[in-house]
């Protein structure tokens, strides 16, 4: 198995205003501690990458408003998470793989190539890496990334063995190993969204959520923040480092333990997507995602007009795998910039880098 702690993207763009300027990071250069500063408009004002030597001059001919878009596919995997990112330069990153091999069926409808550049696993819970084996078998994965922690040693060892058998490079990314694998990301700057240290003493069991390794993508005026299942303990350490983001993957499937008001105030999302199962279906019978209090927080913070409702579970109810099924579900208002895979199926959002996203599926 090739284990490598590779350098930051060999080539990255840093954006001031909307004019991309190419900078190059030498192999082995350190990734920034996290994303851009908190001040300023979403995705704008990204500081130069620490340790990156400026190479070349600003390429004002490059336009963020032309060419191919950045497209983010929130795949409907039921209770779980799997997000396919299509970069404008035809690179593909899959963040998490959902709970089962059915993720491959979804990928086949959206991904036009058999190659995945990165398979990025945020943390070791089955609703995030349960489909990883099937993905590795169905696609040529260049680099497999996880946080190096373990929740189920037998499962993880088997997965890493398959990574090696498929000749994928295995890279650990964590608070102390912040270098991202090499990847030509073109006009998109990719940053690690992880705290400087885990907020929990170990990363197994329920603690694994707060050991999620997230990603931030900046494409001119548009940005995406993917946080896995980070709960409020990890969010608290991300505040002040990840900065405002246009589109937020809502942490931990819309659980009440994530997406605090303070985190939303820092991230200032304009769009939000919750990936969760339907009420009382499969694993969600024991989780009851999303929670009413979190949907309310999103609705208040996004500040848009109501568009539809979502079934969400209130905090007075006891969620457990019981018969009859929990009944504390209510239809809670949502806005036209909030999507839920349980209601909307696959949610595919696209941006040309102008600070807006359009749903294309
Ligand atoms: Zn999860």
Image (cartoon, grey):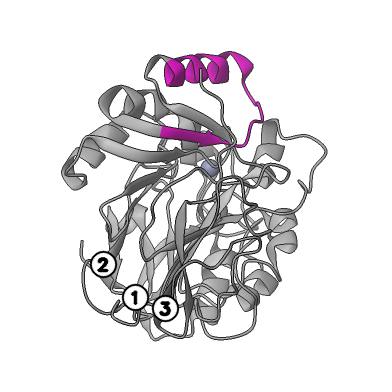
Tell me if label 1 and label 2 are in contact, CB under 8 Å.
yes
* Above or below: residue 94 compared with residue 44: above
- Find residue 58 and report its image quarter: bottom left
Location of residue 269 in the rendering, given as x and y in whole percent from the top left corner: 50, 75
Is the residue marked by circle 3 packed among few (<14), some (14-19), or many (20+) residues within 10 Å? Answer: some
Is the residue marked by circle 2 packed among few (<14), some (14-19), or many (20+) residues within 10 Å? Answer: many
* Distance in Å between CA atoms under marks 1 and 2: 7 Å
Nearer mark to the viewer, of 3 and 1: 3
Q: Residue at x 40, y 37 (%)?
A: 97
Q: Report if residue 345 is visible in the image.
A: no
Classify mark 2: helix, strand or loop: loop
Residue with the mark numbered 2 = 69
Viewport quadrant of the C terminus: bottom left
Q: Check residue 58 in the rendering and tell me which mark sits there, or answer none.
A: 3
Classify mark 3: helix, strand or loop: loop
Residue with the mark numbered 1 = 353
């Amino acid at each position: 198995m090739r284990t490598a702690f590779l350098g930051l993207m060999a080539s990255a763009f840093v954006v001031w205003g909307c004019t991309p300027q190419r900078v190059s990071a030498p192999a082995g250069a350190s990734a920034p501690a996290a994303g851009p500063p908190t001040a300023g408009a979403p995705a704008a004002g990204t500081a130069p990458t620490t340790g990156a030597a400026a190479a070349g001059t600003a390429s004002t001919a490059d336009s963020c408003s032309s060419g191919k878009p950045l497209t983010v596919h929130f795949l409907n995997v039921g209770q779980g998470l799997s997000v396919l990112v299509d970069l404008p330069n035809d690179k593909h990153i899959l963040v998490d793989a959902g709970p089962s091999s059915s993720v491959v069926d979804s990928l086949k409808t959206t991904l036009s190539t058999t190659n995945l550049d990165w398979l990025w696993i945020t943390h070791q819970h089955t609703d995030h890496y349960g489909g990883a084996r099937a993905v590795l078998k169905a696609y040529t994965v260049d680099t497999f990334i996880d946080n190096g922690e373990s929740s189920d040693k037998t499962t993880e060892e088997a997965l890493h063995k398959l990574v090696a058998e498929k000749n994928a490079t295995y890279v650990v990314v964590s608070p102390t190993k912040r270098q991202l694998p090499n990847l030509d990301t073109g006009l998109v700057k990719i940053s690690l969204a992880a705290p400087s240290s885990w907020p929990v003493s170990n990363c197994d069991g329920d603690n694994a959520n707060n050991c999620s390794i997230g990603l931030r993508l900046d494409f001119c005026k548009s940005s995406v923040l993917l946080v896995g299942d980070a709960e409020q303990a990890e969010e608290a350490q991300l505040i002040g480092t990840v900065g405002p983001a246009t589109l937020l993957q809502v942490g931990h499937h819309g659980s009440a333990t994530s997406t605090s008001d303070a985190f939303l105030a820092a991230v200032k999302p304009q769009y939000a997507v919750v990936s969760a199962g339907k009420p009382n279906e499969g694993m969600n019978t024991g989780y009851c995602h999303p929670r009413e209090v979190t949907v309310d927080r999103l609705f208040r913070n996004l500040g848009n007009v109501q568009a539809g409702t979502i079934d969400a579970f209130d905090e007075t109810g006891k969620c457990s795998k019981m018969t009859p099924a929990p009944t504390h579900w209510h239809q809670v208002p949502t806005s036209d910039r909030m999507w839920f895979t349980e209601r909307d199926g696959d949610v595919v959002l696209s941006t040309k880098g102008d600070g807006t996203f359009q749903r294309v599926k």
